[in-house]
Amino acid sequence: MMKSPISYKARRRAGVWLYWAYCSLSYIFLLSPMIVVIGTSLNGPTVSHDASFRFPPENISFYWYTRIPQAQFEALGLSFLLAGVTAVFACLLGVPAALGLVRSNLPGKAFIASVFRAPLQIPSIVTGIAFLQLFYVIGDATGIYWQGTLLGLATGHIFVATPYVVGTVTAILQRFDTRLEEAALIHGASPWSAFRRVTLPMIMPGVYAGALYAFMVSFGDVPISIFLTSPGFVTYPVELFYALENDFDPSLMASASMVIVMCLLFLLVVQKAVGLDTLLRTGGGSR
């Protein structure tokens, strides 16, 4: 029997409504915490030193933005610097590792790949404790202690961020058309020139994505940073964590809202400048 056109249209309409309802609920679930934080930060005090939390805001004001402590701005600058360093070195380590895992004939490649994924399986708090103990051992042997330094923090963050770069670059390389490299070599290009002018541009979507993941993981990390920082040298998430323990007032909401807006603008700029969505859709020159 032929299906009724009316029933088909009804099912199609119901499917469209269900799709939009599902998408709307997903966005509400993802965005509602940020909306609440930003809305609460805009609720100005009704009386002097009124530090109550209200959502939706009753008295819209930027008062609490003027009360953000200087220490949080300093910590924010350190977090951006640390995340940038982490992203760069994660790419310097992750790209050659991905090339080796995909292109080489090393025995035990599956085991090596699992080693590179291991930092993702280890709880971050365990990683932080392990690096703290390692730095104490290094300090006792050399007199140079890495905890509370940019080098120590970056080392811990690079450890957990590199697997993201390895994963994204490996995904591109597994679909990469090696005939493009062969054509470049046939036409007289050196292996390095073929890599720089053919392979690297093709795998850049994976490099960009991995670098972005590494940046975000480093910027938002608390468990590792809390063990490797020192007084006066604290990352932004750890600074907020300490502030929550000591004196929780709406200026924290204002600080968090400022960072939310900054991160969203940063992602928009990166997406516009790099064209990440387009590059990922093309598969980096894959077959």
Image: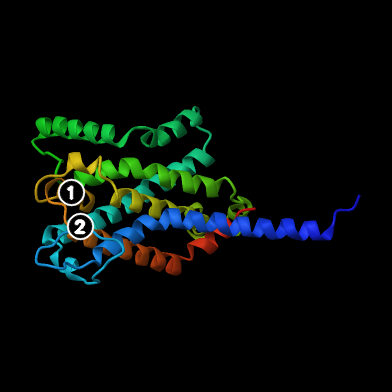
Q: Which of 161 and 169 is in front in this view?
A: 161
- Give the class, few, some or many, for how many residues have Cα within 10 Å of label 1's Cα (few <14, many ≥20): few
Q: Which quadrant of the view contains residue 39?
A: bottom left
* Residue 31 versus residue 122 in the image, above or below: below
Can you identify the residue that label 2 sits on? 252
* Residue 128 versus residue 229 in the image, above or below: above
Q: Nearer the viewer, residue 23 or 189?
A: 23
Which residue shows up at 25% across the image and 44% down it? 222
In this picture, residue 96 sits left or right of residue 34: right
In this picture, residue 161 sits left or right of residue 9: left
Q: Which quadrant of the view contains residue 272?
A: bottom left
Q: Determine if residue 189 is in view.
A: no
* Kind of residue indicated by mark 1: Leu
**Percent position of residue 213, x then y:** 39, 51
Q: Which of 65 and 153 is in front in this view?
A: 65
- Give the class, few, some or many, for how many residues have Cα within 10 Å of label 2's Cα (few <14, many ≥20): many
Measure the alpha-carbon separation of dots 1 and 2: 8 Å
**Percent position of residue 264, x then y:** 36, 64
* Residue 113 versus residue 187 in the image, above or below: above
**Percent position of residue 136, x then y:** 14, 32
* Residue 90 versus residue 130 in the image, above or below: below
* Kind of residue indicated by mark 2: Leu
Which residue shows up at 49% across the image and 38% down it? 101
Q: Do the residues labelled 1 and 2 touch (CB within 8 Å)?
A: yes
Q: Find residue 244 and name its label.
A: 1
Q: Which of marks 1 and 2 is nearer the N terminus?
A: 1
**Percent position of residue 235, x then y:** 20, 51
* SS for dot 2: helix
Q: Which quadrant of the view contains residue 77?
A: bottom left
Q: Determine if residue 101 is in view.
A: yes
Which residue shows up at 29% across the image and 53% down it? 83
